[in-house]
Image (cartoon, grey):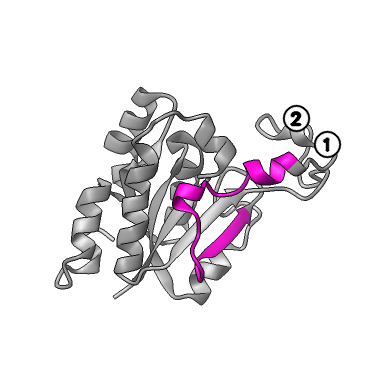
Amino acid sequence: MTSSALLVMDVQRAVVARYPDPGYLPRLRRAVDAARAAGLPVIYVGVGFRPGAPEIDPRNRMFGRLAGRPADPAADLATQVHPDVAPAEGDIVVVKRRVSGFAGSDLEMVLRAQGIGHLVLTGIATSGVVLSTLRQAADLDFGLTVLSDGCLDNDPQVHRVLMEKVFPAQADVLTVDGWAAGQRDPGRPESAGG
């Protein structure tokens, strides 16, 4: 059997504030609780930069405005994982430098060292970190499950197209409740969804 891990990606205070959905954090909390109850690792992946952001090229369309900025103490709070789904003792926190969870991070090293071969993806935004991480993880031969309502996007149509037409080519797409129910069934083969 391949070990699985739940990835909670870009669920940082500043990101959550830009994606208003009052039901999102409670749904994500159910996924985190189900993973912990099943003994699966929960890995938090968030974007972050050193003071002055020397990792950012000013030409980068998404992050370029941060290049060379002085350190901002308020930014530290904004980049923390939202407290409603905060890491617990023993959870792994990975800092990435671009959109994909693998970009500029040690995520692959952590996964390989822990013997994790199957990733259950959640996060904000569906068309950002989830899409980028899914594509790279598939190319790295990880098994994949995406929790459709454990992801958010500002464009519902883009979210739907990704979940219904794009992601199924490389991942199982389940709801949080459907996946959580499978974690409670000890006879369920892991390949059936995560």
The reply to whether the C-beta atoms of the residues labelled 1 and 2 are less than 8 Å apart is yes
Q: Is residue 145 visible?
A: no
Write down the quadrant of residue 194 in the picture.
bottom left
- The percent coordinates of residue 54 (x first, y second) are 82, 46
Q: Is residue 78 magenta?
A: yes
Q: Is residue 173 left or right of residue 51?
A: left
Write down the quadrant of residue 138 in the picture.
bottom left
Front one among 82 and 140:
82
The residue singled out by tag 2 in the image is: 65
- The percent coordinates of residue 124 (x first, y second) are 47, 39
Q: From mark 1 to mark 2, how far is it between C-alphas? A: 8 Å
Residue at 51% in and 56% down: 44
Q: Quadrant of the N terminus?
A: bottom left
* Mark 1 surroundings within 10 Å by alpha-carbon count, few (fewer than 14), some (14 through 19), many (20 or more): few
The residue singled out by tag 1 in the image is: 69
- The percent coordinates of residue 45 (x first, y second) are 54, 54
Q: Is residue 163 left or right of residue 16?
A: left
Q: Is residue 24 left or right of residue 51?
A: left
- Mark 1 belongs to which amino acid? Arg
Task: Please determine whether, in this image, residue 22 is positioned above or below residue 140.
Answer: above
Write down the quadrant of residue 2 in the picture.
bottom left
Residue at 78% in and 38% down: 57
Secondary structure, mark 1, is loop
Span of residues in magenta: 74-95
Secondary structure, mark 2, is helix
Q: Is residue 112 magenta?
A: no
Residue at 24% in and 67% down: 190
